[in-house]
Image (tube, rainbow, N blue to C red):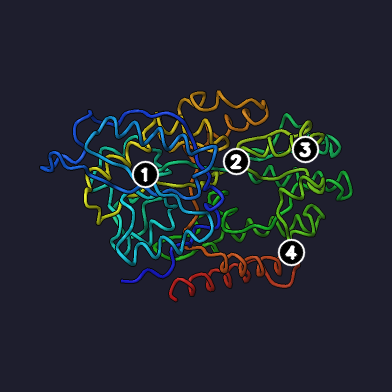
């Protein structure tokens, strides 16, 4: 069966393809032959493929990682391959279709879903169920797909967003930076207050609601294989945005087709609030140092988004037990901690590291970035990824309908009904 499209989720996770770490670690077991087979004296070579991680910063980590594993397993040889960021979908597609998928491969959950559907990667729940206990439940959930009993990837490195506020603008609007909103109701209340007190000069809303926002608000968006974000809760949330837009609490540019994103508008001083990753503090310190001085962060209220990369195992591996063991080695707690010391702003997929964030955050020098990372780390256990079947084209159509509702051309219910129908029609094609 030919694989047609691997990159449903690549738009978000593509930005995660960077890399990490120095140092080795140990596997979950002892140092016996990983294959456990009868090939005594035979060198068992497997391939390990990463995505855009071979560079001056991260290459030493992978070289040391592989050297440590080979030292522990003298009968194993690891061949490391790294593919460029651009064209990764096409490369994995080609490898899968020609039955040349690397034994151990770095792929996001969207790729894993497609490969699992054509039986190209190992179901880890069947192959090594006990190994899954070490990883965050929410991260494992990203590699668990509707209608299939299994897990098709070990969580490797994760990302999420935080809330960021301009305290100077908050004070100007009569808001207390010590009393930041803790839910959407408080957020809208403060947004309306800011707009009223400053005649629309200070705004807290610089984006339209979308599937990610609905998910963040704890609203069900996908159920039983269908999109359902036209439910009563989603309609009510969109109506709050419409009310805020009428009250001049939303940046008008958010409705335009050339919208550049809320983080850029925050840097431009057009909005007092944005969402961004843990590395935003360092970005501000470099690009807008004065703004950085008045910026504070907060963990996302609601359900934080989860962006991630994982490690999967090819089903056609010549040495499946070696490949499975090495995948566990790459993603064990010690190696993930070392990885994140270089990949600052990202988080490990293991429960132990997230319960002890200082183990990988201690190397961060910028106080604001460290604070943000600590806040995000505490929220990782409740972070969840959005529906991987939601394509960019679906997102654009939804944005068009939501914009019409925001302007008052159609109702919130009509907008979401049309968006959901369009998305579900796309699933059937």
Q: Characterize the local packing of mark 2: few (<14), some (14-19) or many (20 or more) Cα atoms within 10 angstroms.
A: some
Question: Marks 1 and 2: which is nearer the front?
Answer: 1
394 in relation to 71, above or below: below
Residue farthest to the left, as pictured: 38
Q: Characterize the local packing of mark 1: few (<14), some (14-19) or many (20 or more) Cα atoms within 10 angstroms.
A: many
List the residue tagged with mark 2: 301
Picture quarter with the N terminus: bottom left
In space, the residues marked 1 and 3 are separated at their CA atoms by 37 Å
In the image, taking residue 128 as reference, residue 279 lies left or right, namely right
Query: Residue 258 got which mark?
Result: 4
Query: Residue 154 got which mark?
Result: 1
Question: Marks 1 and 3: which is nearer the front?
Answer: 1
The residue at the point 77 percent across, 45 percent down is 267
Question: Marks 3 and 4: which is nearer the front?
Answer: 4
In space, the residues marked 3 and 4 are separated at their CA atoms by 24 Å
For this rendering, which residue is in front, 79 or 311?
Answer: 79
List the residue tagged with mark 3: 166
Picture quarter with the C terminus: bottom left
In the image, taking residue 27 as reference, residue 374 lies left or right, namely right
In space, the residues marked 2 and 4 are separated at their CA atoms by 28 Å
Residue 146: percent from the left, percent from the top? 36, 58
Secondary element at tag 1:
strand
Which image quarter: residue 163?
top right
Residue 371: percent from the left, percent from the top? 63, 28
Q: Which of the two discs, 4 and 1, labels the residue nearer the N terminus?
A: 1
Residue farthest to the right, as pictured: 199
The residue at the point 57 percent across, 58 percent down is 211
């Amino acid at each position: 069966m030919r694989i047609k499209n691997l990159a449903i989720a690549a738009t978000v996770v593509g930005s995660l393809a960077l890399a990490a770490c120095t140092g080795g670690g140990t596997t979950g077991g002892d140092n016996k032959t990983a294959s456990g087979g009868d090939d005594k004296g035979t060198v068992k070579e497997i391939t390990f493929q990463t995505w855009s991680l071979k560079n001056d910063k991260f290459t030493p980590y992978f070289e040391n990682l592989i050297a440590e594993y080979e030292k522990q397993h003298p009968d194993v040889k690891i061949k490391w391959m790294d593919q460029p960021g651009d064209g990764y979908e096409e490369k994995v597609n080609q490898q899968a279709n020609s039955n040349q998928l690397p034994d151990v491969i770095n792929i996001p959950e969207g790729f894993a879903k497609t490969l699992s559907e054509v039986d190209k990667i190992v179901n880890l729940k069947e192959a090594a169920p006990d190994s899954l206990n070490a990883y965050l439940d929410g991260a494992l959930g990203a590699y668990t797909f509707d209608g299939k009993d299994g897990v098709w990837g070990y969580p490797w490195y994760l990302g999420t967003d935080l809330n960021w506020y301009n305290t100077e603008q908050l004070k100007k609007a009569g808001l207390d930076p010590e009393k930041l909103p803790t839910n959407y109701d408080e957020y809208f209340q403060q947004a309306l207050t800011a707009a009223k007190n400053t005649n629309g000069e200070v705004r807290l809303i610089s984006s339209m609601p979308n599937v990610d926002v609905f998910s963040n608000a704890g609203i069900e968006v996908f159920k039983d294989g269908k999109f359902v974000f036209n439910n009563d809760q989603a309609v009510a949330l969109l109506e709050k945005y419409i009310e805020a837009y009428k009250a001049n609490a939303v940046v008008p540019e958010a409705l335009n087709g050339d919208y550049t994103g809320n983080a850029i508008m925050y840097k431009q001083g057009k909005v007092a609030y944005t969402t961004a990753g843990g590395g935003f503090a360092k970005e501000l310190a470099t690009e807008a140092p004065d703004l950085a001085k008045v910026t504070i962060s907060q963990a996302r209220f609601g359900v934080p988004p989860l962006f991630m990369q994982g490690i999967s195992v090819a089903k056609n591996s010549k040495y499946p037990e070696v490949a499975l063991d090495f995948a566990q080695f790459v993603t064990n707690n010690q190696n993930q901690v070392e990885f994140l010391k270089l990949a600052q702003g990202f988080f490990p997929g293991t429960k132990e590291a997230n319960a002890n964030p200082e183990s990988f955050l201690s190397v961060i020098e910028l106080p604001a970035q460290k604070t943000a990372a600590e806040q995000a780390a505490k929220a990782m256990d409740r972070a969840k990824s959005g529906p991987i079947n939601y394509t960019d084209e679906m997102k654009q159509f939804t944005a068009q309908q939501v914009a019409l509702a925001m302007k008052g051309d159609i109702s919130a219910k009509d907008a979401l009904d049309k968006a959901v129908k369009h998305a579900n029609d796309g699933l059937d094609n």
